[in-house]
Amino acid sequence: MNAWWFTRLDIERMPGCDRFTLDGLSSGINIISGPNASGKSTTARAITGLLWPSKAGSEDEATASFYLDGCECRVVLHKRRGSYIIGGTEEASCPHTVPEERMQAYTLALPDLINSDNAEFARAIHQAASGGYDLDSAAAALQYRSDPYKPTNHKNELKKHSDTVETIRKAEGELNNRESSLERLRARRAQADMAISQLKILNEALECAARSAEMLDAEAALDRFDARMDNLLPNDAETLQRLKTQHAELFKKKSEAVDAFHSARRQLNSCALPIGGVPGSHINELNSHHAEWQRLAMQLKQEQSNLASVEGRQRNALQSIADEIDESRLSSIVDSPEVVQELLDYAQEATQLNADYDAQSAVKSWVGDTDTSTNLYKARDALFLLMQWLSRPESTTRQHGIHWLVASACGGAACLGVALALLVNPGLCVISLISVAIMLIFLMRRGSSKPGERESIKLSFTELPVQGPKTWTEDSVRERITELQTLCTKLERFTYWQSLDPKLRELDECKKALDQRARDLLARFGIAPSIDRVDLIIFAEAINRWLAAGDEAEGQRERCKRIEQDAFTCKNAINEILARYNIDPADNPAAALATIRDLDQRKQAFDKARSDIRRAVAVIGEARKGIFRSDTERDAFYNRIGTVVDDEVTVTNLLTDLAAFTTAKETLRNRQAVLASCERRLSDTASLFSDAAIDWYQSNTNSASDNISQIISLLRISPASDIQSQIDNLQIIANQRSDAHDAILKIETEVEMERQSCDLANAISDLETCRDVLRNERSKGYAAAAGWALADYVKREAERASLPAVFNRAGELFAEITNNDYKLDFDHRKVAFRAVDTRRNRSLTLDELSSGTRIQLLLAVRVAFVEQQEQGVKLPIILDETLATSDDDRADKIIQAVTALTRTGRQVFYFTAQPHEVEKWRSHLSECGAGFHCADMSEIRQLN
Amino acid sequence: MRILCTGDLHLGRASTKITNLDQRTLSCSAAWDRIVRLALDDDERVDVVCLSGDLVDRQNRLYEGYGALRDGIRRLAEHNVRVFAVAGNHDYDVLPRIASELDPECFKLIGAGGEWEEVCIYVDGKPALRLVGWSYPSGEVKENPLRCFPSLSSTETPTIAILHADAGTSASVYAPVPLDDLRAQPVDMWLLGHIHLSNDYPSDNRPMILNPGSPQAMHPEEPGMHGPWIIELSNGRLSRPIQVPISSVTYCVVPVDVSRCETALECQNRASEALEVELDMVTGDALRVISCRVRLEGETDAHGDLDGVVEALREQPFRRGDVQLDIERIDIATTPIIDLLALAKCADAMGTLARVLISIDNGTVRESYPELLESVAAKVREVHSTKVYMQIRDSATGSSEDCVPDDDLVISLLKQECRNLLAALRSEEVAR
């Protein structure tokens, strides 16, 4: 087997250390000494890191040179990765195959073992032989156990919840049992319901039977009455009485009507009127004629009075016309048209003459007083010149005003002329013509005038015999023009007055002629009206009054005549009508009125008598008909009752029993109604509870029929005694319903409450939770049991697999280490190591060995195990202060053992802080000639 | 038409292995209540509810589970939502009772007594959906129910077959049905029950196979999303089902790789980060608890110090709003950083352990270490048979986790303890 031999270690970077180098390392024992914190542990960690880079610290960096299989090699540790150069060739993988898990096996810390007791030592040897693992401790730490794990904490809890579930289930089971009894209870209740239904039906049937008996009694009672009682009506007593009374009243009425007839007949005769009587129209006509006659008489009287008054006025008018003239002469004049015309012509002419005089007088007053010293034509020329002066263009604005002024003045004069022509005389229209002419001339001159002509006009004006303006300014000229216009107007009126002078003379001539005609008229007709206007008017009025009074008197007379004729007509009409009733004619309205009134009274008496006769006849006829009807009704009455007509006694007897009969009949009817009602109720109830009815029928008749009509018919005729006995039986069954129903309700309520509950679900859930806890415990138990079995198996397997090889090799090493003083033995029976002292030929148990021998044995076993794991490459072993607290003997034995190990070709690193240990090593190794190397960390790292 | 599909309600039960939470929140009845509200919700309003058995848990079938189911069906009926169901091994005797209590128009048990039955749902007088179903006649059915599957009349009406069965197997006491047998039937969709983990079996051709799973996760062995599925039926075609998360609990296994973690604190931080990630992935308004089974994996030098990590993680609060994270268990499946192959060459205890571990990983442990396996199994089974655990044996609980430890469990225990022992010996060596 090749050995891994570090020759040099370069610690590049390790936590807490600067770089340092260990060189010249021995292939045998390397004693690394130094005080605490001098770098021993760092060196040990670097060695393991270089061997198993993945187990190094992440910051660890180191380099080492080593020999392997005779080749010089190199390993670089950097960030937990190892780089290997073996024989100059870079290798990716580590040259040894010892797993990192085995790393600790190469580090031996013996002090603990040295201090342990015997039992522990044996176990340690055994453990070491198995690879150094304490399976028992590991199993204990993992709580593996051989016996089943039995938790107790949750048992009671689980039982409690389990009991709860069981209790609820038990209660549910009991309820379920009760629920299953529901069918029976429901059947019982249904039976009771059936019985109750049948009871209802039978009670109705029983009622029907009772009511039927009552009805039969009523029928029997009714049969005991006279058969004719049924023909009577409730009001037959009244009917009989009414017939009797009615008959008497009719006879009385007839008798009174006959008497009235005769009395009226006598009254009729006493009126002495024709059979047809007096028509109402005659009386009306008489009254109408009489009223007209009366009115005409009054009117005639009034008209005659009026005529006298008119005739008086006529006489007065005649006297006012002429004293000498009498009425007849005047009438002849008036009646002669020529004379009248002549008088009228005279009056007309006189009137015209007076009018002409009046017109002349009006014109004279219009002209008034006029200064005639100025000539009209000169005035007009002056006016014309002044207007021309104004029209010349001295000043445009002023001329414009003058133009308007002249135009206005001419317009006003023209209008004045027209007015005078219309009002006074058409000849005055000349004023208008002149004014228009002036205005035209002015306009023509205005159009042809020139601005320098004013002075020439002024000169021309001064030549006229007309006073000029105060100053020759336009205002003064205008003022003068106004004055001249006024003057011209007055001069023109005066000129006109002068032109009327011939006409005035003509009027005077006419006046004289008229005076002559007046005198002629007086001579001829005695009438000579004055030409004086007043006289003439008075005369004319007198003539007119006289004529009017004459006409009025004539008309009045005509009216009186017509009235007298109308009154006569009325009188004749009245007397003609009166003559029809043999009444003497009336001469005046008063007599006529008395006659008419008498006639009217007789007429009314006649009419009343005739009316009474008619009424009496009608009453008699009506009474006869009533008597006939009464007799007919009476006959029908007796016939209906079934007795002889007018057998009043029998009828009275029957009527005496009528009340009792009616009561009996009513009783029967009521009982029939009650029975019918009962039967209807029975029918309804039986139909409503048809199942019950059918059940009753089938169980009582052994019939399978389910014809409900048939069943109802049978129920109607069932004897009451039978029904009563059935009712008694059914009542017993029906009485059980309440109990059954209550029991059902109770169970159903409980069931419903249970259905709405969640107690069982909660209890199951709690139980499940509890079970889960216990399951967890069981899982732990499973794990503990499985682990224990596993640990046991591994232990046995490890012993079985590794012990023989380890044992053999350990024996060899032990013998070599002890110079064959001891050899190793194995007690297969007790499965334990033993040591044989070859010098004494004695087999010793491990606890019988000295401490030094123990360590030798332990080292042998451990190295043997290590060798067994290595399978190719021997890796260095690290011993840490193995000699500490050892006595000399034990230290020698340890050194001896380690030295023996190096002989097998394994490099050993021994770390110690004790200088005397170093000396021990030096002394021993020098004696035995073994190769070694000592490294003082203080020196290497130059620590003081 | 919208169809809500679910099953395995297990009313009367609740989610297990959750601490510090109101039982009502964890109950399957509460999940059923949420399903009913979902079905009646304006946004998710459904017309038909199909239930694939095990609606009531056998342990609590008499009243509590019964009442919750009946009340829910009545609420659905009040809003004209029709409910169709088949019975499973848990409720084969309960559903017929409920069916007899309720109006058949509201609740229809299909295929009662183990006889296949056909039901047609009409819309506007026309057949819109055909349901075919089979119900458990008893608690155990060893025969494949499809052997008596009826020959369905050919129709254009979409058909959903509802079956509570142990799908994907041919040997089971819970109606074994191989998947190929399901795929061979002329239906549009299979709605299955029994397996609590939901599975929308991929299928290119008809029929779709949907195992809706339980709407409420009840056990750590039921990780993932839980909730009912909604299917849309339009134009005579069934849409792909969409799951609506409704469970208040989600179980999950959180593997935490602590490789290269040198210290226990690093391992703890890495585990915390992984758990925070789980909280970030919260889905569903109803979710209140994420129950995590943490598994520390990988090679780490801190392997021997992870007990402290376990304690620290348990004391650390994890929460997002209303959702709390509950650490159900922490499995330490780490290994110390060991070159097993190199170590295996050693003849010592560690070498032995290394070889055992290698053989376990290689699956040859049975052949290589029969004696060890037998010895471990014997010790483990001795624990199982201990009287103190009598109340959690499978004979008492009926749970598979309480069965006599089988070889797989023994091997996993052996592996774990190999690691632990290896780590302990290593520590011992380091200490030396």
Image: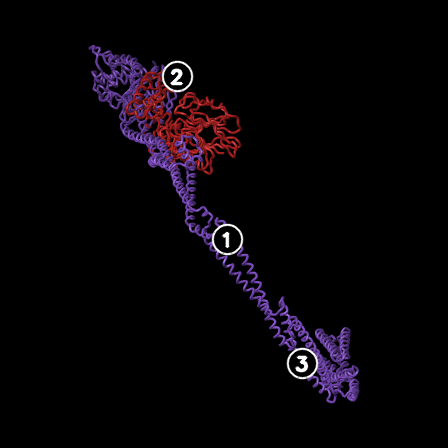
Chain colours: A purple, B red
Above or below, comparing residue B406 to residue A510 in the picture: above
Q: Earlier in the sequence, mark 1 or mark 2?
A: 2
Disc 2 target residue = A87
Q: Is residue A464 visible?
A: no
Percent x, y of residue A130: 29, 17
Q: Which of the two marks, 1 or 2, is nearer to us in this view? A: 1
Above or below, comparing residue A507 to residue B75 in the picture: below
Percent x, y of residue A257: 54, 62
Q: Quadrant of residue A6?
A: top left
The chain carrying label 1 is A
Q: Which mark is residue A304?
A: 3
The amino acid pointed to by label 1 is Arg
Quadrant of the drawing holding the N terminus of chain A: top left
Q: Gap between marks 1 and 2, in whole Å? A: 173 Å
Q: Nearer the viewer, residue A176 or A373?
A: A176
The amino acid pointed to by label 2 is Gly
Disc 1 target residue = A634
Q: Quadrant of residue A329?
A: bottom right
Q: Nearer the viewer, residue B220 or B76?
A: B76
Whether the residues at callouts 3 and 2 have beta carbons within 8 Å, the answer is: no
The chain carrying label 3 is A
